[in-house]
Image (cartoon, grey):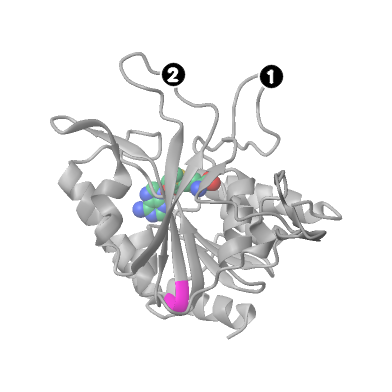
Amino acid sequence: MNFEAIKGLLKEKIGSPYYENENCILFCGDTIEVQKKINKQIFNAIITSPPYNIGKEYEEIIALDKYVNWSEEWLKDSCNLLVDDGCLLLNLGYLSAVDTGRAIPIPYLLWDKVPLYLNQEIVWNYSAGVACKKYLSPRNEKILWYVKNKENYTFNLDPIRDKNVKYPNSMRHGKSRVNPLGKNPSDVWQIAKVTTGKNRSSKERTPHPCQFPLELINRLLLGFTRKDDIVLDPFVGSGTTIEACIRNGRYCVGIEILPEYCEIIKNRIENLLIQEKFEI
Ligand SMILES: C[S@@+](CC[C@H](N)C(=O)[O-])C[C@H]1O[C@@H](n2cnc3c(N)ncnc32)[C@H](O)[C@@H]1O
């Protein structure tokens, strides 16, 4: 099915979108309700960062067991929408639980609640973040890379190779022993967070409080999806996944519950599309 046909199908099942163009479609609604209406295997990949239950302006803190149950439900529904060689790239940080832990990595709570095969965990290391006095300042989040079929999934190493490496002893008998495109980028990725502040605000910053860096999503798309793939982000926030898909020749379906964030996304994507040439 091409993307035009997919958009037609989604509009039939869900109703009017908040925004659409030839590369993306955005629905304003609750992911649990919207995903249940879709109920068809159409996505090559799901890339997302859900609420962490930490009291951000878009969420209310709920009991930990309720959060885990809610997560399990949307994850199960998401996985039902993946094609047979599809993947899920799930970004998760930390939360606190009154009696059990101060900075509990959310993957410890959810990793086995996903009905897919966990291929690998990627550590996203960022250089700036919250300053802490009673414990170490967290400087990483995880991306759990799940695949539906452990023998058949997309992995493109060449486009994500690390070019900035110096190889000692890289020549043998006058021939290079290493890949000229660079080396495997490893499972630890150093990518700066999107920052705020008068003099240090990132160029890509929107008013959304928790925005993915484009560089992170660009790398996930290049490494784990193919050109023209259709990607779902069920918690699309400020629309980073949509922007990255457009920049990298993928299609994107986004779901976001808050209309004010949908408006940020619409403006973001319209501004992107009036640029003559996209830079990755
Ligand atoms: C961590 S943020 C995602 C940020 C996004 N990755 C970005 O780059 O902007 C989570 C988003 O999920 C949205 N959200 C929360 N509950 C939701 C629900 N039940 N259905 C759909 N979206 C929801 C929030 O409003 C918020 O924008």
* The quadrant where residue 61 appears: top left
Label 2 packing within 10 angstroms: few (<14), some (14-19), many (20+): few
Q: Position of residue 231 (x, y in %)?
A: 54, 67
Residue mark closest to the camera, 1 vs 2: 2
Separation of residues labelled 1 and 2 (CA atoms): 18 Å
The kind of residue on which mark 1 rests is Asn
Relative to residue 174, is residue 141 drawn left or right?
A: left
Q: Position of residue 269 (x, y in %)?
A: 68, 53
- Residue beneath the point at 50% across and 68% down: 45
Nearer the N terminus, badge 1 or badge 2?
2
- Residue beneath the point at 34% across and 71% down: 36
**Position above or below: 176 against 251:** above
Q: Position of residue 93 (x, y in %)?
A: 38, 41
- Residue beneath the point at 36% across and 70% down: 79
The dot on residue 131 is 2
Q: Residue beneath label 1, please?
A: 199
Quarter of the image with the N terminus is bottom right
Magenta region, residue range: 82-86
The kind of residue on which mark 2 rests is Ala
- For the view shown, which residue lies furthest in the right direction? 276
Disc 1: residue Cβ within 8 A of ligand 1's nearest atom: no
Q: Is residue 65 magenta?
A: no
